[in-house]
Amino acid sequence: FNIPYFAPPTTSPTVSSQPSLSHYPTNECIQLDIELQFDTFPDESSWMVIEGSFNDDGSFDGEGIIAQSPFYDPTNYTDAKEEISVCLPGEGVYSFAMRDSSYDGMCCSFGNGGFVISMQGSTIAQGGQFQDYDMITFSVPFLPTPSISPSVSTKPSSSLSPTEDCSRIFISILFDAYPSEVRWIVAEAYGDIGENIVAESPLYDNTNAGSTVTETICLKDGLYVFTISDGAGDGICCSNFGEGRYEVLFLGDTNQTLAEGGDYGYFESTTFLLPYMVLPTSTPSVSPQPTSSISPTSSCVWIEVIINFDANPFD
């Protein structure tokens, strides 16, 4: 069928007692834009837009479907981009769900996939690192969260809370020839990898090749992990595709490097603690015989070690 829909003329001028077949018989249409960057297995990915909200387990009652994805054939969509526009019927509450049938999300095990949903140029949500699904509920009209900066950005602020005291973290990336392969996240260092994400990169385009992008985020005190990945497994340096590099700085009275590199293969992670403290360079008097006691004494500082295993913890 075609939109707009024109019913064939009938021989009778009488009006049908049946309602219009159109689910939304008004001309009002509010456009929701969906941008997808697939990983190596696009046939595992699907999305849906509904009226109302999903249940906590990702299910819903089956009514109010606005739009849903087709089957994405790996022949045409592997590591490819897709842009979709969905017509929302009017003001109200809607939900978007992105699913992955293999429980590894769209990033970063088999490529740097991800999604961005926006309305009238304002980003509603973006992501890529999840397990079986990621759900976002939003209202129309959509009102973007005001930024603490007077300049308008198409990306949401990465600050956890711009009104609270926080540490400023500066991220700089010099791309190689393929920025679309690069993603980064900052997550709390607890739980499974991909959970508790507090900031993440947008979907970079290869038009940024050879250029530098920067981002400043604001984080509360805590333990964090910065992870940068490359979908092709060759990092951003030093293959035949450029001399890229990245740097993560703590912005204080003096800027301190938290992480840096470029030649990292598929991914590289660095853990850091906030508030950041510069270690003393002078050597205090230390006993030549360190204590071997593991019992908690007043001179003991406990160190917590967190390990997120993959599928093969024995190696």
Image: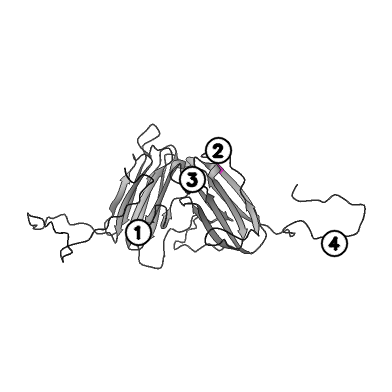
Name the disc covering residue 168, or none: 1
> Nearer the N terminus, badge 1 or badge 3?
3
Identify the image quadrant of residue 63: bottom right
| Residue position for label 3 | 113
Q: Nearer the viewer, mark 1 or mark 4?
A: 4
Q: CA distance from mark 3 to mark 2?
A: 14 Å
Q: Residues within 10 Å of mark 3 (few under 14, many from 20)?
A: many
Residue 121 visible in the displayed image = no
Q: Residues within 10 Å of mark 2 (few under 14, many from 20)?
A: some
Q: Residue furthest front?
A: 314
Label 3 with label 2: CB-CB less than 8 Å: no
Find numbered disc 4 in the image and state the secondary structure of the residue it sits on: loop
> Nearer the N terminus, badge 1 or badge 4?
4
Q: CA distance from mark 3 to mark 4?
A: 49 Å
Q: Amino acid at mark 1?
A: Arg
Q: CA distance from mark 1 to mark 3?
A: 27 Å
Percent across and percent down for residue 284 are 11, 58
> Nearer the N terminus, badge 3 or badge 4?
4
Residue at the location (34% across, 48% down)? 269
Name the disc covering residue 74, or none: 2
| Residue position for label 4 | 17
> Nearer the N terminus, badge 2 or badge 4?
4
Percent across and percent down for residue 259 are 31, 49
